[in-house]
Amino acid sequence: MPKSLLSSARSAALDAFGEPPSVIAQAPARVELLGNHTDHNGGLVLAAAIDRYTVIAGCASEGRHAAVRSTNLAGIDAFAIDHLVPGEPGAWGQYVRGVTWALGETHGPLRSGFEAALAGNVPLGGGLSSSASLQAAFALFLIAAGCVPDLNPELNDEDRMALAKILRRSENAFVGVASGLLDQFSSLFGRAGHALTLDCRTLAYERLPLGNPAIVVIDSATSRKLADGMYNIRRGECEAVVRYFQDKRGADRVQSLRDVSLDELRTEWSHLEPEPRRRARHVLTENDRVTRGATALRSGNLAEFGKLMTASHASSRDDFDNSSEALDALIASAEISPGFLGGKLSGAGWAGCTVNLVQPELAEEFAASVCEEYIKKTGLVPTIHICHAAEGAWGKSVSTKE
Ligand code: GLA
């Protein structure tokens, strides 16, 4: 746990509530290495948790009230734990309330209220899933604080999968964002030096050795305001293709794009609308790239894995239309920089960050070169984060004297 984050969460909790925190929790952000927009299509994803975190410090409190303070963003969110309403759209407090709500829905009313402060170093709004990291850290805090009935803080993988689904539900049903399972899964299942695969239809998963490449996340300095609306439009386009195949083959045989093969898509190409069919081609070729990427990792072939990432970016750009001039310029700059193995946009797309795999000894040189090239191409100044694959979320009790 980064000491500076922990001490800022602890002192914020002490300042705000006058009590030294007795529970701490942390959860990592994630990068999507392959499998872009496959999760909401019942497809395959390959991701990694990274060493950028949300950290929470606090304690259970008497009564049925909660108060949460953020050290990054202003204010304290105070609410009654038995009467949860989402509150201001887009505010970080919605995620906190959503987790409280969803845990209560599944496990019964929380045993008590709580007071907590959160600190984090996950770049916001860049496609690294700061929100899932907040959700997972917060859930682990509540569990370790003993607020959630019948949930032991020593979570095994089965518990973690159940929790990922609860967190997804809180985002879908409470916050109102129609996301897939990728983000919460990655934050909960991360492992240092490993990537994660997830089959979003069966929920089968695997931790695959990634070695120690630098995972270089580059923020394009462009904002993602468009992304939420576009996300839902793309979902609708994918669903239109599913409906076409349902009409042809029966709804029971086609539940998602996962039930459609690339060959079938090619055969029906001329009957499908131009945009939906390209969206579907992106999703189906991404599934294939995840399968090939997993094989490459099993044989330690990072060069091959990197090529698949760059091919994924091209498919996002050309078929899913979720790239942008800035993201394309970042990838073009990365391709001519030292140590580059592969790179693509990260997360929903349209703006935000790219994620690049880079030979670790060349990471600094790579960063300097991309920065220079990108400024030359766009006049924008990128922010660069050199990261590594990290452990998943945890929470624990601590001595209040530490
Ligand atoms: C966002 C969503 C994820 C996933 C990606 C695209 O990050 O939150 O669930 O759909 O976009 O792959």
Image (spheres, rainbow, N blue to C red):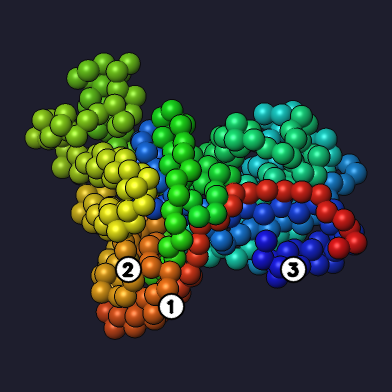
**Residue drawn at the location 26% of the way across and 21% of the way down:** 246
- State if disc 2 and disc 1 touch (CB < 8 Å): no
**Residue drawn at the location 68% of the way across and 30% of the way down:** 105
Q: Is residue 91 in view from this perspective?
A: no
Element type at mark 3: helix
Circle 3: residue type: Ser
Q: Earlier in the sequence, mark 1 or mark 2?
A: 2
Quarter of the picture holding the C terminus: bottom right
Q: 313 and 248: which one is in front?
A: 313
Asked if ligand 1 lies within 8 A of label 3, the reply is: no
Q: 141 and 131: which one is in front?
A: 141
Quarter of the picture holding the N terminus: bottom right
Q: 318 and 66: which one is in front?
A: 318
Circle 2: residue type: Phe
Which label number is shown at residue 340?
2
Element type at mark 1: helix
Q: As displayed, is residue 2 above or below residue 146?
A: below
Element type at mark 2: strand
Residue wearing tag 1 = 364
Q: Quadrant of residue 64?
A: top right
- State if disc 3 and disc 2 touch (CB < 8 Å): no
Q: CA distance from mark 2 to mark 3?
A: 35 Å
